[in-house]
Amino acid sequence: MVDAVRWGILDAMIATFSPRTARHRFAERLAIAEMRRSYDGASRGQSTNGWRSGNKSADAEIAAAGSILRDRMRDLVRNDALAAQAVQVLVNNIVGAGIRPRAKSGNKRLDKKINAAWKRFEKTCDFHGHTDFHGLTALAVREMIEGGEALALQRFTRAAPGEVPLKIELREGDHLDASKAMFGNDGARIEQGIEYDSTGRRVAYWMFPDHPGGSAQAFGRRFTSERVSATAVAHLFERQRVQNRGVPWGVAAMRAMRDFGDWHRAELARKKTEACLAAIIISDDAGTDVGGTGGPGGGLGPAVLDADGNRIETFMPGMIGYSHSGRDVKFNQPSAAGGVGEWTKAQMHIIAAGFRVPYALMSGDMREANFSSARVGLNEFRRMVEQIQWMTVIPMFCQPIWDWFILASRTAGLIPVGGAVDVEWAPPRFESVNPKQDAEADLLEVRAGFSTLAQKIAARGYDPEEVLEEWKAMAKLADAADLVFDSDPRRVSKGGGFQASSQGDASAETDPPEDDETDDAASGGGQTE
């Protein structure tokens, strides 16, 4: 704290004539500084010297660094195995096999018609024709993680009768014209290629039709940005502040990844050097060198030659060199360093934390993970994934595309006009660490009334109505074939005993005896029900 309170010129002058007064002034200034300091992190002194911070808005910081962060993160994902694996783990868990919608208009016949139209649409919705809706979702999420953001454009097209006249085009954040800026007198503005009205709401995006970094010839690319209405764009990015554009995930670990990669290459070079154990044969043979100074080394000093008389400047493992002119050539031998594994693991933990993925999933190192620790770590990771699914991917990407689909379907006359069509989204289910335990827990929740059967089926990524209809059809087939399976709750009780169908004789169920009762019956001293 003393460092934060400077001894000024006036204090020095007062101290010359009245040291006591100067001492009191300094003590009072110390007390005032202590009262003002609410946080140690805001204090000024030797411990915080060199700590640079600013009060810029998120958009201002992204405008200055967004392009560089995007380029560097893409380079890391292309060339760094840990970055590539971290991105893949996030995409696998956030999207998986797909985030599936189900119409919930309240009219079952209408819902079936809408769901059938969606199944046809999702297979061919890619504007470029490469994948389906779930593939587009996975690619958009990858772009969000790797490049910070992704843009989905609404493309109305001609379609055959019965088909939805809509396609979805994905674009990277590079398409936004960041140089496009305008500030009107009425408060309307354009910043980083996004146009806002006087109230601050988005009204349009200014985008390049072609990627600015495309490989096409310069005269073949369109360098003039075009205005696209905001209603025809779904902008996917994670909001960590009040911001309008995104930054790549893992930026907190970017320096650590770069330094770790540099260190890994340096360590690899050192390991190669350690393997270069060379035998140098020293002799007093004199010969005629090229320079005529007597000796293979000539006037260049001691030389090490190979068997053919060529000068050796690079050592190889198992190499044998010859030194002439009677001069001694000495080489240092690097010694092996310890602690490499511990330091490597510590750096990988930092990188995993920066990407917000469990260390074991990113590195594949399961040696120190047991059942309890793995389950606790996965639970926290899954909370983060669910938050991204329900607060970012679904409202910013999936829901706008569903709204476009409903509009296009009504335009094509596939569904009736009027009335809102609600939708229920089903993200992919998480694989169970202990399937038996989780299934029993789900059963107990349903029997206790804490949850419904439909909710548990939906949590596994299936449509409850489709599952029940399929069950009904399979039950009819089993009854027709006079077959009874253990999985049929109408015929078999929880304990495995046969019970009459609810539609037939309501006789009491026959459960298998308990273990202790079985033992008694086997010994002839017990009864079974």
Image (cartoon, grey):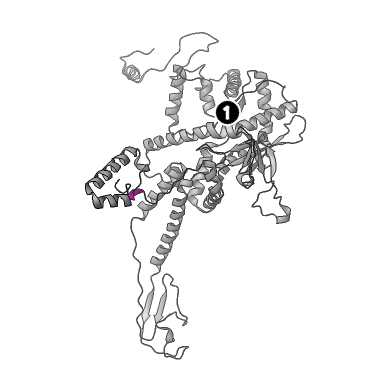
Could you tell me the amino acid type at mark 1?
Answer: Trp
Please give the range of residues in magenta.
Answer: 43-55
66 lies above or below 511: below
Q: Which residue is located at x 35 percent, y 46 percent?
A: 44
Q: Which residue is located at x 45 percent, y 73 percent?
A: 314
For this view, does 451 lie left or right of residue 482? left
From this viewpoint, is residue 127 visible?
Answer: no
Q: What percent of the width, then of the height, locates residue 17?
A: 24, 51
Q: What percent of the width, then of the height, locates residue 14?
A: 27, 49
Considering depth in this image, is 44 or 23 the residue closer to the camera? 23
Considering depth in this image, is 487 or 290 the residue closer to the camera? 290
- Quadrant in which the C terminus appears: top left
For this view, does 452 lie left or right of residue 403? left
**Predominant secondary structure, magenta span:** loop
127 lies above or below 47: above
From this viewpoint, is residue 271 visible?
Answer: yes
- Quadrant in which the N terminus appears: top left
Q: What percent of the width, then of the height, locates residue 478?
A: 58, 20
Q: What SS does tag 1 mark?
A: strand
What is the quadrant of residue 413 in the picture?
A: top right
Residue 72 is covered by the magenta coloring: no
Q: Name the residue under label 1.
A: 425
